[in-house]
Image (spheres, grey):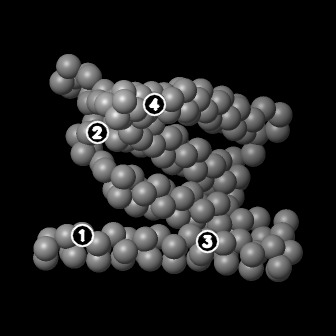
Amino acid sequence: MERILENLIFKSRWLLAPFYLGLCVALLILLGVFINEFLHFFSGEISFDETSVILLILTLIDLSFAGNLLIIVIFSGYENFVSKIDTDDHEDRPDWMGTVDFSGLKLKLVSSIVAISGIHLLKIFFALDKYTTEQIVLFIVVHLTFVVSGVLLASMDYISAKSKKSK
């Protein structure tokens, strides 16, 4: 009975596979948003002033960071919790694939969120006239919360890894 239960629990990891497929669909949606932002810039009155171009570039970078984050979560999450991805040593296989554990995944996730938040904050600074002082302060506080959370998470992982080495 115990063996059957353990086997069932082990096989239940496959219930996560649809989550990762859903994230693949989210990546397609993000690509649509990326293309839409790019096309939106060139539709209507084209304005190649410095601020508009910088805002477009920051938006595209922001979206690409979100896409990178999705790929990291999809690959690492699937490999850590469901099954190894057999790529037959494909030449394009990312070097980090198969080496990012749950702790590394958390750090990559938090650092990506901090980067995305920083880009969003930079976009806000280019359009300060569109926001109230309270909104700007709130955005800064949220960004700093992400930064502090990331530093604390990295510190906890560092302490945990150091304590494991000393044992």
Q: Which residue corresponds to mark 4?
A: 12
Residue 10 horizontal side relative to residue 23, left or right:
left
Q: Residues within 10 Å of mark 1 (few under 14, many from 20)?
A: few
User: In which quadrant of the rendered view does residue 50 lie?
Assistant: bottom right
Residue at position x 34%, y 56% in the image: 104
- The residue at 29%/72% (across/down) is 160
Where in the figure is residue 18, as x and y percent of width and height?
A: 54, 27
Indicate which disc, 4 or 1, sits on the residue closer to the N terminus: 4
Could you give the CA–CA distance between mark 2 and mark 3, rounded to whole angstroms?
A: 29 Å
Residue 167 on image: x %, y %: 13, 74
Q: Does residue 3 sit above or below 111 in this rendering?
A: above
Circles 3, 1 touching at the beta carbon (< 8 Å): no
Q: In the image, which is nearer the foreground, mark 4 or mark 2?
A: 4
Secondary-structure class at tag 2: loop
Which amino acid type is marked by label 3? His
Residue type at the position of mark 2? Met
Badge 2: few (under 14), some or many (20 or more) residues near its Cα, within 10 Å? some
Q: Residue at x 24, y 45 (%)?
A: 99
Distance CA(mark 4)–CA(mark 1): 29 Å
Spatial separation of the CA atoms under disc 1 and disc 2? 21 Å
Q: Which residue is mark 2?
A: 97
Tell us which disc is closer to us: 2 or 3: 2
Give the Cα separation between the discs numbered 4 and 2: 23 Å
Q: Which mark is residue 161?
A: 1
Rendered residue at 47%/70% (across/down): 150
- Residue 21 lies left or right of residue 160; in this view the side is right
Q: Which residue in the protein does label 3 denote?
A: 143
